[in-house]
Amino acid sequence: MTNTINTATIIILLITGVYFSSQNQQSDKNMNTDKLETATLGSGCFWCTEAIFQQLKGVEQVTPGYSGGKRPNPTYEQVSSGATGHAEVAQIIFNPEILKYDELLEAFWQSHDPTTLNRQGADVGTQYRSVIFYHNQQQKEIAEQYKRKLNAAGVYENPIVTEIVEFKAFYPAEDYHKNYFNNNKRAPYCTIVIAPKLDKFRKVFKDRLKVTTNNTM
C-alpha cells in the first residue's frame, strides 16, 4: 500500500503535539468499569477492523456491525448491496485510563488506507468507506484535529477522505461475523488479507498489545 502511514512521522507528530497528551496508564487490574468509553470506526471489512482492535491493551470489547445508514436492523446482504447507506464498522468499548481515544485513532489511521474512497484493497463499495462516528464533542474535535494535522504534514501521498460524522445508531452484525478471524483463521480471506495486516500491526504496536493476541473477545 503506497499510502501506508510512516511510523517515524507518527512519532514526530506525537512529540510535537498533534495528539492530545496521554496520562499515565493503569493496569487492567485497576480498571474502573464506570469510565469505559465507546468508539465506532469503519476501516473496510469489519472482519479486519475487529481483529485489529482486539489486539490492543485497554480494549474491552469489539463488536462488528453496521452504522451510518438509514435502514434499521439491516442484514449483511442488504448492507453489501450498498443500498442501505451503512458502513461496516466495529464498535469498540475501551478503558481511557489505559488507552486514550487519540491512541485508538493512531491504530485506526495506521491499520488501513484512509485515502481511498469507498475502498480498501479488493473490497469496493460505500459499505467499506473510511469513517469515524464520534460519540461526543471531544471525540469530534480530536478526530478532526488529527485528520487536519496528518493532511497538513503530508503523511500520506494523497489526501485523507475519512468521514467524521456524528454517531446515530449501531446495529450488531450477525453472529457468524463476530470474532471472525479467530474462528476462521484458515479461511482464504483470513490468510490472504487479515493475517498479513495483523502481522504488520503487531510489529508497529508491539508495546501496546495484550499479553496474548489469540483472544476470543
Image (cartoon, rainbow, N blue to C red):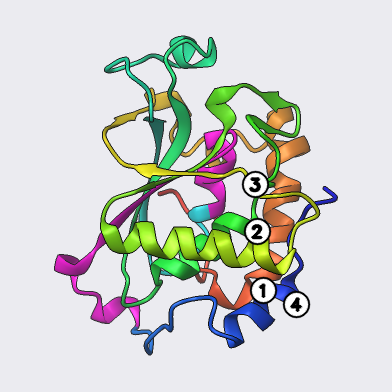
Task: Read off the residue under disc 3.
Answer: 114
The Cα–Cα distance between marks 2 and 3, rounded to whole angstroms, is: 9 Å
Mark 1 residue type:
Ile
Q: Position of residue 89 (x, y in %)?
A: 45, 37
Q: Amino acid at mark 4?
A: Ala
Between disc 1 and disc 2, the foreground one is 1
Which residue type carries mark 3? Answer: Pro
**What residue does disc 2 label?**
110
Q: Are marks 1 and 2 in contact (CB under 8 Å)?
A: yes
Q: Is residue 205 above or below residue 197?
A: below
Under mark 2, the amino acid is Gln
- Residue 213 visible somewhere in the drawing: no
Q: Secondary structure at mark 4?
A: helix
Mark-to-mark CA distance, 3 and 1: 15 Å
Q: Kindly indicate the quadrant of the structure image that contains residue 168.
A: top left
Determine which of the numbered discs, if any, sits on residue 10 in the image: 1
Nearer to the camera, 53 or 150:
150
Query: Disc 4 marks which residue?
Result: 8
Question: How far is the residue under mark 4 from the one under mark 1?
Answer: 5 Å
- The magenta region covers 27-52
Q: Horizontal placement of 59 versus 203: left or right? A: left
Marked residue nearer the N-terminal end (3 or 1): 1
